Image (spheres, rainbow, N blue to C red):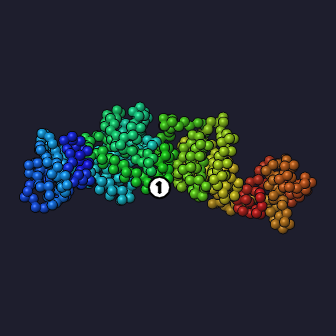
Amino acid sequence: MEIHELMAHLDCQFLTLHGKKDTSADIYSLHFYTPEIQAFESNILYFCPVSHMPPADFPHTLQLLCYGPDFPAEDYENSCLNILWYNSGNSIEHLFNRIQQLVTHLQRANAGLHLFANAFFSDQGLQYMVDIAYEVFGNPIFVIDTSFKYLAISSAFSPNNTIFEAENSSGYILEAGIRSIREANLDEKIRNASAPYYFKNPLHGTGMLIASVKIHGIEVAKVMLYESLRTFTDIDSILLSRLSRFVSMELQKNSFFSQNKGVMFSYFLADLLDSPEINYPSVRERLHILGFDLKEDLYMMTISASSYRDANAKLEVIVRELNNILVGSLYAIYENTLVMLFSRSRENGLSAYELTALENYLKSNSLTAGMSNFFTDLKSARRFYLQAKKAAEVGLRLQDEGPIHYYSDTYFYHIMEICEQEEDLQYFIHPAMMKLLYHDQERNSELLKTMHCFLQTPGNPAKIAEQLHIHKNTLLYRMNKIKSLTGCTLEDGDEIMSLGLSYKLMRYLKMLPEVNV
């Protein structure tokens, strides 16, 4: 413990510094000074009455606490002795014991810091660090993120408390606890405190010390020390402050946390995507408590890492802008993918303005997104997240114009992927389409392209001719040729559907010529 720390902890108006006045000198131990001592150590604080002080020209650097009246301060002005003068009639034994207690606490703190450092460098994760901290403090430790999710709880702690048991089971602080935190304005008090903040928890009837965990100055979590097994001491606050820094470094080693910057709801969304045992009926209620209300229809949108890595803007900026467009969305970097969950009313859905703004932003930043079908049950979150990922993947493979690929437009190709594992897809193609393909290859014609335009807009010859940049008479000739070659009437709904699916199959199998189809 350095001299200035010692003086701050003692907070004693009777202590003044003289001589060398080195406040950075470290104190490891205490002794009483006697002239018989031959070897002096610079990290020992020697107690000595004024009447028995060594001379001002003493040749050794010495940390000295002298006590008693009539201290000759002027004589020691240029001395190499570092002198604390205790000018009080109070018992020197009491002061000695108090400083000894502080030094002992310091030794315990240093031992604790050593254990924290070993836990950090062991690379065994946050839970291991919290379990080590439980041994150091002798009290349970909890780490929560900004969405009130427990990131780690002391494993050895077995509370006889129904609230703790419920929170431990759900992995989140309960509604009553969140309400208590907000009513006490606890977050602001913790942020404004220069040291861990002490709070008497009314729900548990237990005191707790809370330290903020920050990454690059941004609060991402809190470390909470509960006063359940042992009464707090001065050193607990110092140790908890140090622990919060190790927790910050540990979280930055965690790829999920570092990617998401501890943003509120990131872990929450990740839980929805990979926790089948989550209590879904309470999810909407919890989101409501946290200020996020879900509407009837839910959507998933994904942007792969390969897309946002090449973007013109940084990921943090991308997320902020997307949140401005898709107001009321949750996001997380999950499985190396930017995932956004948002909801809209069934009556209104996504507005034309939102879709236009979203498409423009994605295009301007060279981003490609996948969009799921809408869903209503949060239990299906992962299924529709995979839908959105598949939509983007298929859209990119087929080189469809983006920047948003909808699963409703690409689902058929997903079905093909699944079927391809069992059968050669080429055998599902309608023979009429194969005849057109062979004819085009042999005669350098464009009957397949003409068929495709017809299948896209049947019954609208003017539009088909416009798309193909040909005269209506030329279109009529081609359509008659197609009917003659294939034997199809092109009037039956089932026939048209079968030909359309066959065209998609040929496209999926890359059997079509390199033309804009």
Q: In the rendering, at what x and y percent does residue 489 appear?
A: 86, 52
Q: Is residue 355 left or right of residue 262?
A: right
Q: Residues within 10 Å of mark 1 (few under 14, many from 20)?
A: few
Which residue lies at the image location 65% right of the left edge and 38% below the top edge? Answer: 349
Q: Is residue 263 left or right of residue 31?
A: right
Asked where in the image residue 60 lies, by quadrant, the reply is: bottom left
Q: Is residue 342 left or right of residue 491?
A: left
Asked where in the image residue 328 lies, by quadrant, the reply is: top right
Which residue lies at the image location 48% right of the left edge and 37% below the top edge? Answer: 290
Instruction: Pick out the residue farthest to the right.
Output: 473
User: Quadrant of the image for the C terminus?
Assistant: bottom right
Q: In the rendering, at what x and y percent does residue 128 appear?
A: 35, 53
Q: Nearer the viewer, residue 427 or 246?
A: 246
Q: Which residue is mark 1?
A: 255
Exactly how many numbered labels are in the figure? 1
Q: In the rendering, at what x and y percent does residue 239 appear?
A: 30, 48
Can residue 176 be seen by looking at this rendering? no
Q: In the rendering, at what x and y percent does residue 193 appear?
A: 36, 40
State the SS at label 1: helix
Q: Is residue 197 above or below residue 359?
A: above
Which residue lies at the image location 8% right of the left edge and 56% below the top edge? Answer: 35
